[in-house]
Image (spheres, coloured by chain):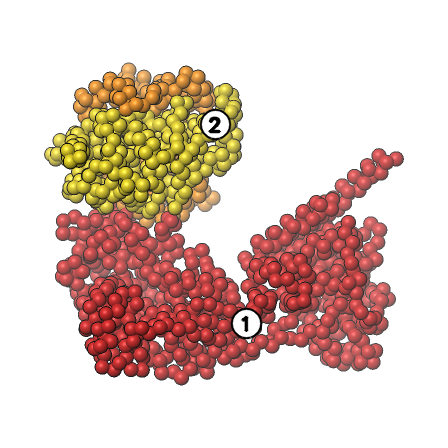
Amino acid sequence: MKKIPDKEILLFKSCLVNVEYPGVESSTKYLFDKLGIEYIVSERQSCCTGLGHYADLFDQFSTTALAARNFGIAKEEGHKNIATLCATCYAILKKSCNILNDKDDIREQINKILDGSGCHELNYDADDMDSRENIFHSVEILYNKADEIKDLVKVDLSGLRVASHHACHYCKVHHKDTIGNARDPMVIETLAKACGVETVDWYDRKTTTCGNGFRQRYMNKDLSFSVTAEKLNSLKENDVDILLHMCPNCQMQFDRNQESIGKSVGTEFGIVCLNISQFVALALGADPYKVVGVQTHTVPVDKVLGKIKQTNLCQ
Amino acid sequence: MNNYNFSRYAPKSSIDIGVFLCRCGGNISDTVDIEKLASSIDAKVVKDFENLCSMKCQKNIRDIILEEELDRVVIAACSPITHEKTFRNHIAPLNPYLLEMANIREHCSWVHSDKNKATEKAISLTNAAVERVQYARPLDAIVRKTKKSAAVIGGGISGITAALSLANQGVKVHIIENKPTVGGNMIKIGKVFSPEKLAEECSLCLFNPLINEAVQHKNIDIMTNSEIKSSERKAGNFNLLIERKPGHVNEDKCTACGNCADICPVEVPNEWNENLMTRKAIYKPFPQSVPDIYTIDDNNCIKCGKCEKVCKMNAIDINMEGEIVPLNVGSIIIATGHKGFDLKKRPEYGYGRYDDVITQMELARIMGVNGPTDGKLLRPSNGKIPRRVVMVQCAGSRDEKPEGKRYCSKVCCMVSLKHASFIKHYYPDTEIVICYTDMRTPGMYENYFRHVQSKGIKLVRGRPGDITKKGENIVVRLEDTLRREPMEIETDMVVLSEAMEPSEGTLKVAETLNVGLTEDLFVKEKHSKIKPVATDIEGIYVCGTAQGPKDITESVSQANAAASKVSEMINGGLEIEPTIAVVDGRQCEMCGECVAACKYKAVYIHNERISVDPVACNGCGICVSKCENNAIDVMGQTDAQIFAMIEGMLKDKKEGERRILAFVDYIGYVAADNIGINRISYPESVRIIRVPSINRLMPKHILFAFENGADGIFLGEYPDEVMYSSIQEKVNEFRSALIKNSIDTDRLMYYKVYAPYFRGLANKLAEFDKQVGKALDKLEAVLYKASYKDL
Amino acid sequence: MNTLKIDENSFELAEDIIKDLKASKDLGILKCIQCGMCTSVCPAARHTDYDPREIVKRVLDKDETLILDDILWNCFYCYTCHSVCPVNNSVCEITQILRQKAIDNGKGKPKVAPFSAYGESFLEFGLGSIPSNFFDDLIKDFGKEWLELKINIEDIREDLNLGSMFLPKKDVDDINKILEKTGFKNRLNKLRRCRDEENTR
């Protein structure tokens, strides 16, 4: 398995986490602090372009140029290990890093552009970053600390059945770098198990996309929803209480659209959607509103909150 | 520039040399002025003949040798590749290695037309031979004796076949099997396909007689529960240490009554039945096990002692200890086989999740009369006969993804057809669907394919992406690529055609014996075309699925081939050319550089001394160039011989004359001969020198040549996969030596030679001659400028 | 009947794709044996006529009408085909490259134009966002709470002790300069024009 760092980490902000599930960022910070992971957040970091990139709006060259700028910032701030909150940021940055390392002409053109844009100090030299050794998903950083997490659990979440949705852009795009078997990574399950819950380790359509499909959600909603529905139906058949995520885009797809999809297929799914960092933070006793940010969720998180209340009563 | 201490290599006393020139019926004398050549050579005797290779000349040469009391002989004639052996015989009573040949035909008269230049070149070629022969030493052919015994590792069909073949030829064979019984994978398969009879035959009925023959054979010793712990090579033989794990049952006393297993309280999955049923901790793997005794599985035994008490024969000893058995053998055959691909690595296929998703090997056990269902095809989940069986081909094979195997496992198409045929025969109502990408049934197997097809099996072309469960049914999802639409196949049983991968035993044995593996971790053959059962270590052979996926037919032929290779070594007695590496123990400091450098694994450490396996050594000389203490040398290719040759080639070089030394390996030499045979010309400047390999050369040789007037050095060698990387390193080493000594690197060229592509070599030599010319012009201009400045 | 003419290089389109900046190193397009595993796991193939195996077939046959084919726009970019392909081909990447070609030749512009607002907001803030033109539709599906979330997000972020998500002005300016030079602004302008034309229509 690849080596996962626990210091000199730049926590890479995500556009959808920013405005949809900011609790993912605060939960991750909460956990990083508890686990003694040394990291920073940079106000200068731009977005990765992911949503635009996969809507075919951004071209690969522009995306790569912006990645080079962000890599420059990570180096300048002495925190070369990037940990993303979103699977698409992860995929985009790794791809850009590979291009910058492998294609001399592209790297030179981009450096010229950085020079001409007053960003000379952010120039990228070949192998400044290594896609495998410097670019991670924040969930991998947590996975690496699963044993320590086990010792820090405060809330008894047993009785809840959870299942995972390992974002496609985490496990499939750079499948050689995925922890475990890219066909079924079990990264989220490992963390959930550390929190003492029952995990549904396999369900039909487990490896299927969330159905967002970038443009599909907006331009071909029916197509998008029929894929999401396949998955929701399977989760329902497996009596899943919580679907655990590692990507805000997937989380939106399942959380925000769940009711509409339920109506169209005549089912009430009631599947809580949480990022795995939010789930672990809750298990470790984080405040649901001040840290985990459950107030931004569409499907009520009550099932989990009830468990937390029980624990508090016991104390 | 460096000064070489040449005197170190000088011969001790004056040596009388006879030089014999051949006119070759005009082939040489039409282009080379033989009189001028004869008068230019400095030797005790110089004589020319019309046809040196004739029987009449043989007598002449011998007479002169005796009369003149010659010590060494030079033959200036045709290529040594044609007649070296002949002339070596001609010079008796002199030692055959006291001969040197100058190739003035293929490398001179046949490639040049200018008589003056050709004569000049013939003189230098002959001079070089004269110089070189002074350093020749008498050598004797090495006769290697191989011990008349062999170890066969693995007691499957390949191992048993090889062992029987050797034993029948009088060789003592030790079969080393790590399981409690021999039989391997074949014994687990109920039926084998027969493409000739278009039928399925009973596997056990074919194999059991062979096993029994092996058991009873006086020359075969079967060691079960045994593994090789270590192996040491010694003078072409192997000292092995075998660890014999305790079976806890005395072979001589056990009657295999089975009372012990009845009373044993421990139940564990029965691996011989692919874990489809259980066995006890004391067990006999299967009814026809060999040896026919019970054995205790140490990993699961709780040492309660019940079996010991119940055994009326007192055959059981729970405290029996293992032993280490030393074994000295002449050869080893690796027949360690394969295992099935771990389908848990393909979680989307549901293996291990759904009871009715099984492997072909599990199906083989289910269909085996001595299997968990007594040969009935029943679903593991509910014991009912399946209405439909879907087979999924290439499960783990032909997959470049990290968990997959890149290769085709070769047997699975036939295995699935075999099972389909068998099922159709006994369960005509059960439908068979095979999901395939390509049906691979080459040769006669195609007949069998058609035969099974005619029984009514459904073929769907598409590679399934996942397998799931919907209600009672299993669903296989794929694209029917010929209909071009995604489809789901409902079924109640799925059989995954699992890839073959090297068994753990194969990996372990390869490590212990230091045998090379392929990228896919099978034992690597020395050459897939011409040495398919040799490994990279002389005396160790491989057969069966340890070497790569193959079926029983192929395994058996390979096993016989391996056995015949072993017996070749034993019965033929091997006479080996003495031109191999020899270690001088007094100089050697045991740094091990030569061991690491040897691509043929011919150099090894034995009893704290460096030894060379004469059979494995091909005399390439890479070890010599790595030895800092001059403790190793290649016979017939000593430094003295190489320096003398270079010096001779450059002797009497005239002002403005260009001389290029072309060092080539055997293939390069053959190609150069072919240039001559085809009468293609190349510049007279080129002088070809045969070396075992470029690896034999060192920067000192190259620099010495330049220092003594060489204008260019050409290196030609066949890019053999074993040697090529080190040749590249070598050439780079030479380049940097030239740079260090301010010699233009354009004056050095490396070229990959191929025997049939001699025209390319001729062109390259001409091209290099021009390149050298330019480099020299450049040098001259620089020197002129420099001297002008000085003025 | 299709005739494979002598001297016709049917791999031109495939080779073009292999050279594209988006194509992974060692993209296995030429090794495709049409096994259909990609299609068997493709969500778009289950619900539309999109067939990844056939996309590769058409590319290998140099079928340039593929670039104009609406079918391309059904891919989810989920990379499932990419992650299972036994020969390391990636239909997902191929489709991305083909869509770019469609944009270049004009046919694809209207497909992408509706996402222009993403680019506009990126240039303004250096941040990604859901294009605002989709908001009305989304509120219908997501519920009014989502609109409230949009209004209250700053407060919620404050409650969560998260700093400002906005970049300093100098950095936004730099990003604008970079995107000007990479040609993105120019590209965006064309797409905006296309969007505005569609809207007036």
Q: Which mark is residue B145?
A: none
Provide the letter of the chain coloured yellow: A
Provide the letter of the chain coloured orange: C
Residue at (33%, 38%) from the top-left corner? A142
**Residue farthest along the left direction in this orientation:** A266
User: In the structure shown, which secondary structural element does the residue marked by tag 1 occupy?
Assistant: strand
| Residue C129 or residue B287, whichever sits in front | B287
The amino acid marked with disc number 1 is: Lys
| Residue B318 or residue B293, whichever sits in front | B318
Residue at (26%, 33%) from the top-left corner? A281
Q: Which residue is mark 1?
A: B234
The amino acid marked with disc number 2 is: Glu
**Residue farthest along the front direction in this orientation:** A315
Q: Colour of chain B?
A: red
Give the quarter of the figure containing the C terminus of chain B. top right
Residue at (38%, 83%) from the top-left corner? B217
Subunit bearing disc 2: A
In the image: residue C196, left or right of residue A128? left
| Residue B549 or residue A295, whichever sits in front | A295
Q: Which residue is mark 2?
A: A76
Subunit bearing disc 1: B
